[in-house]
């Protein structure tokens, strides 16, 4: 199946009462592992990449790699720009035919965040999904951390969503970027944000949240949950263990194939944690 808009992924999940995982790729092994897990679970999904992770390949190579692997897959999948910190990043991803976009101006004051996000909406047009962020999520994304993390203010949600015209709202409700095993969702705050939001919600930092919390997110209007650190750790660990077992290891393809299996297992577990009733 060709890549679909993030709007289609959201609609497909909503129709089935599912939560889409959103898994970050960087290379061929990660992409292969993600799609292997998608084919096992058959749950609509986002594959995504942040600007910090296209430094080696560029957006076009990511598009080619993902779209080729998905050509024979029947599950709806969107290719998403994660944490586009500038309109230039949004334009670059769109030029490479990404089908879903996140604009992240969350560290800016409210009015500036709204204005930049609304401009991203204009650039994307109506056919591509737009995710915007209100409240700055803490932790590190590729060793980049916000200067000032802040939770989402429910009192700002309605005006922000209406002013931007976004399709999804990323929120800061106790979730933390990176592997943060002590992170916990504030479900009371999440409920108030959901009540104020006319669009589905997105939770970043899925790698650090416990299964019992991941399994509840769908009850609070969350339609997309980002997972990155778990996948990267699985790949790095696979290569590290191979080297530790044999410092003279020279079969790159054998270890790469082992990494694909390890990544697919991580992705499948996360998808099933997010959708316990579908497991």
Image (cartoon, grey):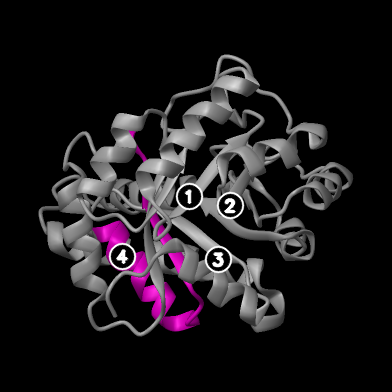
Label located before the other in sequence (4 or 3): 3
Q: Which residue is mark 1?
A: 130
Mark 2 → mark 1, Cα distance in angstroms? 6 Å
Q: Which residue is mark 2?
A: 168
Mark 4 → mark 3, Cα distance in angstroms? 21 Å
Q: Which residue ends up furthest to the top in the rendered image?
A: 147
Q: Position of residue 269 (x, y in %)?
A: 56, 68
Q: Which residue is mark 3?
A: 20
Q: Secondary structure at mark 2?
A: strand
Which residue shows up at 47% across the image and 82% down it?
42
Q: Secondary structure at mark 4?
A: helix
Is there CB contact under 8 Å for labels 2 and 1? yes
Mark nearer the viewer, 4 or 3: 3
**Left/right of residue 77 with respect to residue 174 in the rendered view:** left
Dot 4 surroundings within 10 Å: few (below 14), some, or many (20 or more)?
A: many
Q: Which residue is mark 4?
A: 260
**Left/right of residue 2 with respect to residue 16 in the rendered view:** left
Vertical order, 104 against 258 (above or below): above
**Left/right of residue 117 with respect to residue 93 in the rendered view:** right
Mark 1 → mark 4, Cα distance in angstroms? 30 Å
Q: Which residues are magenta?
A: 29-52
Mark nearer the viewer, 4 or 2: 2
Mark 4 → mark 2, Cα distance in angstroms? 30 Å
Mark nearer the viewer, 1 or 4: 1
Label located before the other in sequence (1 or 4): 1
Mark 3 → mark 1, Cα distance in angstroms? 15 Å
Is there CB contact under 8 Å for labels 3 and 1? no
Which residue shows up at 31% across the image and 82% down it?
73
Q: Secondary structure at mark 1?
A: strand
Dot 2 surroundings within 10 Å: few (below 14), some, or many (20 or more)?
A: many
Residue 46 magenta-highlighted? yes
In front here: 163 or 4?
Answer: 163
């Amino acid at each position: 199946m060709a890549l679909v808009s993030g709007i289609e992924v959201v609609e497909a999940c909503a129709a089935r009462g599912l939560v889409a995982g959103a898994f970050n790729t960087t290379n061929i092994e990660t992409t292969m592992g993600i799609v292997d897990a998608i084919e096992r679970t058959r749950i609509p999904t986002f594959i995504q990449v942040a600007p910090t992770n296209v430094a080696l390949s560029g957006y076009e190579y990511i598009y080619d790699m993902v779209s080729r692997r998905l050509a024979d897959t029947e599950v709806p999948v969107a290719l998403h720009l994660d944490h586009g910190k500038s309109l230039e990043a949004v334009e670059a991803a769109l030029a490479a035919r990404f089908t879903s976009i996140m604009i992240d101006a969350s560290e800016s004051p409210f009015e500036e965040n709204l204005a930049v996000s609304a401009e991203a909406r204009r650039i994307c047009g109506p056919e591509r999904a737009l995710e915007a962020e209100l409240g700055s999520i803490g932790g590190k994304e590729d060793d980049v951390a916000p200067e000032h993390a802040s939770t989402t203010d429910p009192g700002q949600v309605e005006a922000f969503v209406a002013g931007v015209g976004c399709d999804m709202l990323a929120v800061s409700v106790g979730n933390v970027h990176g592997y943060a095993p002590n992170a916990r969702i504030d479900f009371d705050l999440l409920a108030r944000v959901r009540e104020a939001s006319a669009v589905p919600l997105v939770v970043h930092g899925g790698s650090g949240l416990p299964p019992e919390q991941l399994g509840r997110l769908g009850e609070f209007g969350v339609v997309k949950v980002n997972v990155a650190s778990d996948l990267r750790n699985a790949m790095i660990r696979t290569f590290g263990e191979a080297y530790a077992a044999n410092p003279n290891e020279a079969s790159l393809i054998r270890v790469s194939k082992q990494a694909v299996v390890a990544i697919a297992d991580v992705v499948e577990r996360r998808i099933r944690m997010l959708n316990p009733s579908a497991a």
